[in-house]
Image (cartoon, grey):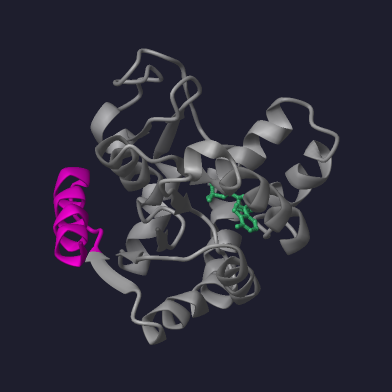
Amino acid sequence: MVGAPGSGKGTQASRLTKALGIPHISTGEILREYIANGHPLGNRIKEFIDRGALVPDDMILAIVADRIGREDCERGFILDGFPRDIEQANALENVSQVDCVINLDVPEERLMDRLTGRRTCKSCNHISHVSIIGDSMVCPDCGGELTVRADDVPETVHKRLEVYERQTKPIIDFYRQRGKLIDVNSDQTPDDVFSDVSEALRKLC
Ligand code: AMP
C-alpha cells in the first residue's frame, strides 16, 4: 500500500489482511513497538519519528527482511509504509517479488485534517476520526483506550507531508513504470475505498 500519511493505508491494509488471510506488515507499527517495549534502538528511532523524518534505510531494511522471512509470510503479505523511498524500493526488489502496489490517492488539502483528527486505539490499533467519534477516547471497535499519535500533531504532520513529497512520492512512478501500480481514490468512506481496492485486486487475479 502506498500513499501519503493519512491516506488510509493502515485502515485498508488491516481490512485486506482479514479478507486475504495474510499478514499486515506496518513498518511504522513495528517501530512504535520498538519504542514502547524499550528496545535498545528505541530512543534513536523515536528521535526520527518525533521529527517526522524517515528512520535510516539500513535499520528499516533489517527489520523488514527479518519480518518477511518468517513462516507466516510464506503465502504473501501486505506492506504498509514500506518502501518509503527509492532505495527501499530497490532493496525490496532484491528480497521479494512485489505483485501489486495500491496507491491510495487523497487530495493534499484533506491530509492535515485526516491526520490531526486521527485517533488510534492502544489495544487493537483501530483508526478512528473525531468527525465520527467526537470527543470520545474509547475505541468503537474493541472498547480500548484511544490516543493521539505523537507524530499526528500539526508541526510534525507538516514535516511528514514534506518528506512524503520529496522522498516517498517518486516510488509511485517507480511502480507505475513497472506496470504494478493501481490507483484508488481514497477520498471516500473506508467502506467505499475497500470496495474499490477489492475490485481492483479481483481484476488482477
Ligand atoms: P507510519 O506509521 O507509516 O505513518 O510511520 C510513522 C513514522 O515511522 C514515519 O514518519 C517514519 O519516521 C517512520 N517510518 C515508518 N516506515 C518507515 C520506512 N519504511 N522508512 C523509514 N521510516 C519509516
The one nearer the camera, 84 or 71, is 71
Q: Is residue 25 left or right of residue 78?
A: right
The x and y percentages for residue 181 are 33, 74
The x and y percentages for residue 1 are 40, 58
Majority secondary structure of magenta residues: helix
The answer to which quarter of the image holds residue 150 is top right
Q: Is residue 122 above or below residue 178?
A: above
Q: Is residue 82 above or below residue 144?
A: below
Task: Give the residue at x 54% y 38%.
Answer: 71
* Residue 201 is one of the magenta-drawn residues: yes
Taking the view exactly as shown, the residue that stands out farthest to the right is 40
The one nearer the camera, 57 or 112, is 57
Q: In this picture, which residue range is highlighted in magenta?
A: 185-205
Q: Is residue 143 above or below residue 60?
A: above
* Residue 26 is one of the magenta-drawn residues: no
The one nearer the camera, 69 or 127, is 69
The quadrant in which the C terminus is found is: bottom left
The x and y percentages for residue 187 are 23, 58
